[in-house]
Image (spheres, coloured by chain):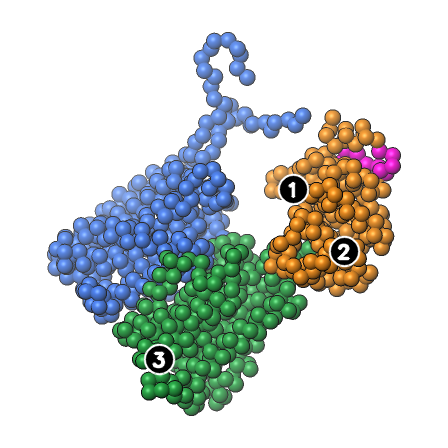
Chain colours: A blue, B green, C orange
Amino acid sequence: MTEATAQAEPQPAVRVVRRTWFSVGGAVVVAAGLGVLVAVPWWASEGQARNLVEFFTLLALAQMWNLLAGYAGLVSIGQQAFIGIGAYSLYLLGDDGGVHPFAAVALAGLVAAAISLPTALLAFRLRGGYFAIGTWVIAEVFHLLTINGADIHVDTGGGEGVTILSAARLERTFRAHGTYWWALGVGAGSVLLAYAILRSRLGLALTAIRDDETAAGSLGVGVLRQKVLVYVIAAFGCGLAGAVIYLNLLRVQPDAAFDVNWTAYMIFIVVIGGIGTIEGPIIGTILFFTLQQELSDYGVWYLIVLGGVAVAFAVWVRGGIWGLVSRRFVLELFPVRRRVVYRHGERARAPVSE
Amino acid sequence: MVWVNAVVQGILLGGLYALFATGLSLVFGVMRLVNLAHGDLIVLAGFLGVVFTHDLGWNPLLTLVVIVPLLAALGFVGQLAILNFTLDSGLSPLLATFGLSIIVQNTLLEQFSADQRGLSAGTIETDSIRISNEISLGWFPLTTFLVAVVLLVGLQLVIRWTRLGRALRATSDDRRAAQLVGIDNRVVYAVAMAISLATVAIAGIFLGVRTSFAPTTGPTRLLFAFEAVIIGGLGSLWGTLVGGVALGIAQTVSAQISPGWGVLGGHLFFLAVLLLRPRGLFARADAS
Amino acid sequence: MSCFYGDFQALFDVSLHVDEGETVAVIGANGAGKSTLLGTVAGLLRPARGEVRFAGAPIGRQPAFRRVGRGISLVPEGRRLFPSLTVRENLLLGAQARRRGPWNERRVFEVFPLLEAIASRSASALSGGEQQALAIGRALMANPRLLLLDELSLGLAPIVIQSLYAALPSIAGEGTTVVLVEQDVGRALAAASRAYCLLEGRISLEGPTSELTREQVTGAYFGV
């Protein structure tokens, strides 16, 4: 207790910190790694670079799905809608609109975000599992509209698909490098975006909503508004990733662009890697990507096994691999939790009951 | 008159959709679980029908005798062994059933390839009653519709008048209070899932006779089932029939307007209902 | 036994015993741990330390729905009826455990005549007193050896509470052991032969109700 004389303000007995020694060390390693990754077009083969494009776009998709499900509690099985919208926006802006493909990618993300607002209006009339299926219906609507585009005077090439000529016409190495850096930007950006959000007030609100929605609402957290915001951000991320994916592939077909398997991959990655954490999707993507390369010879068995593992994790290993690791070692590579540190190592004493 | 026929066909199609939707609705009502593998299980039933009809030469409707108990047992065990452990979380059951959906689809792909298959039930498939030049009632769609109605009536009777029905309603109302009167909710959930999969078995066989199906067509059936439930209104079994019929009509009329627009028209109708009457056409006041 | 909700300890080494056929009252203020105690006996909670022994044998980790079959019935705080069932259906559900005994629908209607008149009404449309009567009736339908009543009088008008308590002798008369948790000290002590008082998770007083003085009870209840 302070003495009742005029003195300098008492030192607070506690500080709130987020850094841990592990996270600071990790940050250094990550920064170095990023440097290496940026330089890839100069030291890696074209095949390796293309693999990395796939990897980073998958990572971005996983981070977006994790943002929705792990933090906002929204299970969406319809994110493929925005992947497809991103891809087709790239096509329409680039080929019909004359926008430079690299710029069109960014715009495609914005288009996806814009379209996500009216879809949110519909989707959020449902809750829980029915919300999930509702997002799938919406994705199917976009899928079918794209196939039947001619009927509504939008030339999307119908069921056959289209080639993104504006990108195909770019000089080859230029296109390869640009695509790679876009992918790296989207992948790393998604991680940083998730990190930034979770350290912000939105993140705090989301954690509160995730823990107890009613309580959060009664404290003044605008629950619906925050959820819609996250939904739009995730749509932006998926649209961006979709555009980059198809910038890489050049050929867009509606059945592939709007395939629910995109969501399946996102779910596998996040569930197995660790839902509700930033590190989880990174681990999950690495694992998934490696498995995909190694097991592609086994056809559908690989998917069956993956499905089985996902079920097992969803039921019994809720926190995923990162959950297991971080619980055992109390680690946080991307620190988002705030800890209270006592001065001089004092421990707070519980109030004595009278 | 062509339009009247479209509506009539839509009504009959609604019977099939009600069959799809009943199991989904029941499980949600009792344990708030949305089974994302529902559509794939319908297709699984269809493929089991293929095995019995092609390999053993049975009539598809006869296969029900085996497939219904088989799927019911699968549901009972699956719920007890796996899904019961997911009910404490909102995400977990969705993720688990989604994973199961992938497993079922790909196992079917592995066993049967991606080809479209069908079940043939003989002349009943194409026989019809001619009402007029442009309107005819197919015997099979009519049978499907009647089976759907009978099933719904049967379920209503079970739920209202039997001990099991009371236990289902009580567990759905308040799981802990149900424990206090001696109800083991794990078993109740398993029974509910068993009933659900029994209806899925029936739906699968009737689907198979009516049209062709492939391992990857499961998800679309889930979407139709879901749309029928939402359009009809949560918490009402009869709403499921109405929802199915409404969806069926929306699809057939849309297909009449433009051939490629059948399914899309149904989806758009669903979204319109969601926008204008989100509680559905028949929602119960206390439905969640 | 000791019971926790997460890190929060609700009961600290609480010990009590109830003889067959007795009516015992457990009184205490809000948050004293009374519902926790009953919940543990009924099987809704598991004690971190200690055990529950029923008819001489430890009950172990039996889940709640099995304990009903052994003869333990809890009328939970807040009644927790099934709103989508009628009064009669709620009672029928109580008999789910199929235990033999004197209690059936007719006998319950004898003790709570008001229920018979509303037998077909939905449980969601009942007054507080009707709900409580139904909740007790539902528990009785399981023919329990031990009836646990949690906060019988909560939220009810005095005249209603009176009529509910008037039914207790009929219940005890059948040989049922009753443990009565109450905030309404006067009625609880009048209805029971022995009482325990809980204060912040510990027993602060116990003894035959005939011997407890008002000062003792007030002191033990409020901890002064």
Work out whether C38 lies above or below B172: above
Label 1 element class: strand
* Image mark for residue C4: 1
- Residue type marked 1: Phe
The quarter of the image holding the N terminus of chain A is top right
For the residue marked with disc 2, what is the amino acid?
A: Pro
Can residue B44 be seen in this snapshot? no
Name the main secondary structure of what is drawn in magenta: strand
Label 3 SS: helix
Decide: few, some or many residues near mark 1? Use Cα within 10 Å; few <14, some 14-19, many ≥20. some
Q: Which residue is mark 3?
A: B5
Name the residue: 38% across, 61% down: B273
* Residue C206 is covered by the magenta coloring: yes
Spot occupied by residue B144 in the image (x, y as percentages of width and height): 46, 80
Query: How much space separates mark 1 and mark 2, taking CA atoms?
Result: 40 Å
Picture quadrant of residue A241? bottom left
- Residue A232 in view: yes
Chain letter for mark 2: C
Q: Are marks 2 and 3 on the same chain?
A: no
Same-chain status of marks 1 and 3: no
Instruction: Give percent across and percent down for residue B197.
Output: 52, 71
Residue at the extreme right: C211
Q: Residue at x 74, y 32 (%)?
A: C221
For the view shown, which residue lies furthest in the top direction?
Answer: A5
* Place of residue A216 in the rendered image (x, y in percent of width and height, measured from the top left): 47, 41
Q: Which residue is mark 2?
A: C113
User: Distance from label 1 to label 3 (Cα)?
Assistant: 66 Å
* Residue span colored magenta: C203-212
Which chain does the numbered disc 3 sit on? B
